Image (cartoon, rainbow, N blue to C red):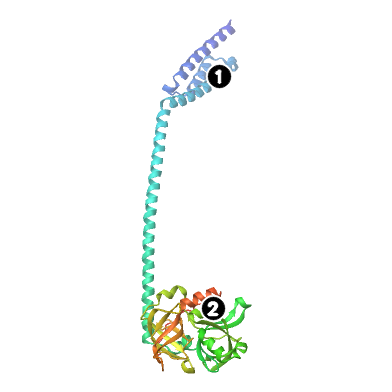
Amino acid sequence: MKRIWLETTCALAAAVLLVSLHHQVTHLRSQQQDTAAIERRVDRAVAAAGLADTMRDLERVRGSVEQAVARMQQLEAQLRVAATGSQQANAIATELERAKTDVARFRDQVSTDVERTKALVDAYIREVRAKEEDAAHRLTQTQGAIDKLARAVYRDPDQLTRSMLLPTVQLNGDDTVGSGTIVFSGRNARAADAVETYALTSYHVVRNILADTPRAAGDGFDVTIYLPTERLVVKGRMVASQQKIDAALVRLSTDRELPFVAGVLPRDAIDAVKVWDPVCAVGCPLGNDPVPSHGEVSSLKNELNGANYWMVNAPTYFGNSGGGIYRADTHELIGVFSKIYTHGKGTPVVVPHMGLCTPIRAIHDWLTEERLEHLLQPRPAPALATPPK
């Protein structure tokens, strides 16, 4: 009976505990009681009953309770998740969509602001560059004007001699004399790096020499080169010619690289030549050594036998034919002297200030057709001379 009573008592106690446990779990969310209190209540009930012999059974019951509590906690967690999903999920989703919209709008605004800022920066950069280019152009013009004025005020005789007088050569036949200008002297990559020297002259000068000096056709004609301390006489032979523009190219028979070569006006600078531009004519009139004379460009349009010539008023005479016409400020070759005006029929009178020259543009075009334009490589303009102290 005692054992039955004990089992009955334990069963009733367990039932009471289970009922209490179920009640506690059901109200866990609202009351938030510590499940440890339930465990302590079970321990106290067991201790009060003095049922040491039934501890094993109670431990089994406790394990069942713990499993039930764990299950209830799991259900509670699922309940919280489910509750959150039902009560707040929609609000969270709506807020999330609003946030996404705000982020997209913000990104669009930032992109627009960046593009607008970039456009403003680009416009500013273009404006600054334009101002810099304009300032650089004005500076170049100003520097050019200063250099031109300085050369007009102070001219270095040695520099003038090197750049315009010494490139001049004299062409000689038995009864003919003319002039020429060295435009190339150096190693020619197109001729296995051999040293070659070429001079520009007038076609009619070479024609007249070959006419009055028959041996020149085979042996060549004499060409006098003027150096600071010596004269060098070499043979010359015409290698290209253009009668229409009265121009010829003569190769000088020497393997010596000559130090004084005329700087030729580049093709892209030809349009800058204007009437009134100061010029210097250099040649060997009447068989003299090279002499310079100064004047200006008088005209840029003088058609003769289907070709255009420039007129200069720098004094010239017989023998200047084939010599160089230079810009007085930059010392660049702008033409080859060709003809001189005469007046009267019986005894013509030479008009020395009315000379015609073949423009350098026609020379460029002709030698380009001959595939020899590389011989007209422009040289740098002479540096501004410094007055002696």
Q: Which residue occupies 51% across, 24% down? A: 74
* Residue 40: mark in rendering: none
Residue tagged by mark 2?
A: 375
State the residue lying farthest toward the top.
Answer: 1
Query: Mark 1 packing: few (<14 Cα in 10 Å), some, or many (20+)?
Result: some
Q: Residue 198 versus residue 260: which sits nearer the camera? A: 198
SS at circle 2: helix
Q: Quadrant of residue 94?
A: top left
- Count of numbered marks: 2
Q: Which residue occupies 47% across, 76% down? A: 362
Depicted 272 relative to depicted 292: above or below = above
Mark 1 in CB contact with mark 2 (< 8 angstroms) = no
Residue tagged by mark 1?
A: 62
Q: Residue 203 versus residue 334: which sits nearer the camera? A: 203
SS at circle 1: helix
Tell me the amino acid under the disc marked 2.
Answer: Leu
* Residue 244 image point, x, y percent: 49, 79
State the residue lying farthest toward the right.
Answer: 192
* Residue 384 image point, x, y percent: 42, 82
Q: Nearer the viewer, mark 1 or mark 2?
A: 2
Q: Quadrant of the C terminus?
A: bottom left
Tell me the amino acid under the disc marked 1.
Answer: Arg
State the residue lying farthest toward the front.
Answer: 346
* Residue 311 image point, x, y percent: 40, 82
| N-term-proximal mark, 1 vs 2 | 1
